[in-house]
Amino acid sequence: MNDFITNIKEINSVIIIQTNGYLNNVGGEAIAEIIKDKMEQGCVKFLINMKETKIVNSIGVSILIEIIEKLQEVDGKLGYFNLAPIVEKTFNIMGLTKYSTIFESEEIALNEF
Amino acid sequence: MTSDLNITDLQLKYLELETLLDITNDLNSFEDIQVLIQEILVKSCGLLNANSGLILVEDSNSDILHIEANFNLDISILRGILFKKNRGVLKEIINSRKALSINIKNDLYFSKTLCKFGLIAPLFDKNSLAGAIVLFDKESRKGIESFSDSDSNMLSALAAQASIAYTNIKLIKNIKEAKTFNENVMQSIATGVFTTNLMGEINHINKTALNIINQEREQIIGNHYEYIFDSNQHINRLISKCEQDSITISESQVNLQCNEKITTVNISVSPLMSDFEMPIGTVVAMEDLSSINKLKSTFKKYVSTQIVDQLLENDELLNLGGQEQNATILFSDIRGFTSLSENMKPSEVVETLNDYFNQMIEIIFKYNGILDKIIGDELMVIYGVPNSNENDSENAVRTAIEMQEKLIEFNLERFLYQKKPIKVGIGINRGSVISGNIGSSHQMDFTVIGDSVNLASRLCSHAQPGEIIISDNVWKDLINQNFFISKKLKPIKVKGKEKPIIIKEILYDKWKFNYDFVFIKLEDYLLKNLSENYTYHSIDHFRDVVYQVERIAKKEKIKKDLINDIKLAAWLHDIGYIWSPYQHEKISANYAEILLKSLKYPESKIKMIKGMILATQLPQKPKNILEEIICDADLDYLGRSDYTEISDKLRMELELDTKITDLKWLRIQENFLKSHRYFTTTSQKQRTKNKHKQLKKIESKLKSM
């Protein structure tokens, strides 16, 4: 776990990753690495708690897209909750929400996932 | 990867435009420059895929910029670098007025960072460089790359928007600071100030004015002045006149009545003008004179009212400096106070001194003395400064006599409390002194200095307890020498003076036992010190016995001077109850002996007083007519109509120890009345019959039980 990933937990076969800071190249790669490891262990559902990530760039978004691609191959899912408005807007513009879901809270995410 | 999942250039452009729009919208919603700067930086980094960045902002009044915000960058490596406007890329962006790429490796400012690529854009405040946005290392999936021309254009656009927001916030900040500054000045001044607008509504008011008007800010702001000053039509007229004529009006000593508080103020109403010299309201200034009055009262602790008024009327008297003039100086000093205070608690020492000083200073002011200094138990008083008077020496001598006489009364109080007397020696001299405010501009002491002052102090040291020693200069300066009795003393040698100093002692009426005065003091002492638990042995009992001894003594044809002695014994006969009800007659007799000796009461009579007190002990055994009188007076109520009322009080007092049943109480009364007899013919004639009636009543009650 690096500084960007502050917590990983599993609830009902869903891996919840908590991030902190800039979701850029470095941050995106950190998420990708965790998800790759967990996928190898058979996990296919992932949620990212982005409460502490207030800014994201297109490189971070493109890494998330790469993750979604890989998950689609194994019928997996990626979702997010606790998004700052600017981050949510970026995800929408970048078309991320067509292939992954934004939730208001962890509870709702777990219920609907 | 499917085509659906590609981020297209169109999406990126859309994101750029949306972000730019967001930033433009957001920028004007910030009021805090620091928050704004951080927001610009973070959004710029996100939008342009920069790995990190910082924003430099100008230091006020200098050509140097400092790092105001940073994102994802370790700025410790930039510590110590001077970002000067006229050097390096900062100079370049001033000229170009747009974003420029930075060659980090060779850059004057950023070469120490571990970054490879940089992009810098200027923030302008009008035409001056106010700061710069610096972004580092554009990220891509392949790694770090340089910023493109498109990035440069985008950052220029962002910086242009940010500059406008930055300038606006700075302007608002400056206006707020100026407003706060003005308000702070207004709030902190001691003059009450409020302003009215063209509608006559009060729109600003400071704390002092709120205090004077005695209302909360919310009750005042927005209301018409006529409403606020409804009970002060005079103020309304002043403001109204100022509004009509656009002239400044001032009035002094105006009484302002607000919410039952009356404040005397000096008031000034001036027109409030706009930049175009048009009236836009009024400004009202009120000087609260109560602070001056407070100063006056504080000052009056040190000098008499007359002197305070002189000094306040004549500012020049308050100037530093001095003038040579003749003055009379009085020194008084408590003799043996150090040894006296050794056996006292510190609080008692302070209480004693305060009590003593209060009484002495009252006399000093009565004779227009200036209390120059209180040094321990010593007082230094000046007469004749700042303005001299032909009565200065006479005032000083009269002060001294009255001080000594007052001390007699003061000491009587002390004797009552079995405390040692306070005795003072007083020395007075007259001569040339340098008078004025001596000290620094921060702390001035109005005082006098010179040989004459020193001699007054020496005369005081020479005076024995109770003596008033004056120099020949003082005696010669007395206009009415025949008012005073003096005794010539042997001239004294004083250090520093070749010739012996001629001195006199001023004589005054020293203590003479005054019955009436002692009775008043004793009654007061009993009132203050008798326990409220004693329902019978209360002040009423003392007053009754004193009254009865006089009545019986007169009937018994006792001489007038002896009647006073019996009255004295009556005031003292149960005084021992203050300390204990047991053997109180003995305690009373001992107390009387000590007190009366202190008061110089004749020794032979003290024995007589003690005898009268002890004679009241039950069973009463009087040995002479005086003792018979006090014994009969003490139990006079046994044969009076108020017997039941008084005996009930006695029962209540006796029940402080143990409860007495009704039957027992009747038996006590029966036995007491049967065994009692009056000794004087007067009481036998006037009280025996009634006493027997009481006895009969009690006996019949006992029979019926």
Image: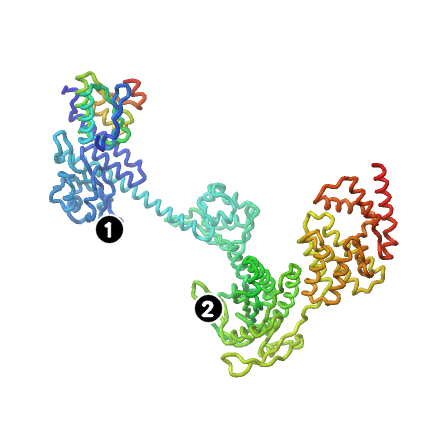
Quarter residue B68 falls in? top left
Quick one: label 2 or label 1, which is nearer the N terminus? 1
Which numbered mark, 2 or 1, is in the foreground of this view? 2
Q: Position of residue B143 (x, y in %)?
A: 13, 32
Report whether mark 2 lies on the same chain as mark 1.
yes
Residue at 72% of width from left, 47% of height from top? B535
As drawn, B675 above or below B43: below
Q: Secondary structure at mark 1?
A: loop
Report how far apart the C-alphas of labels 2 and 1 lie in the structure: 48 Å
Residue type pointed to by label 2 = Ile
As drawn, B189 above or below B374: above
As drawn, B264 above or below A84: below
**Which disc is residue B62 wearing?**
1
Does residue A48 appear to the left or right of B336 in the view shown? left
Whether residue B130 appears in this view of the structure is no
Residue at 26% of width from left, 22% of height from top? A10
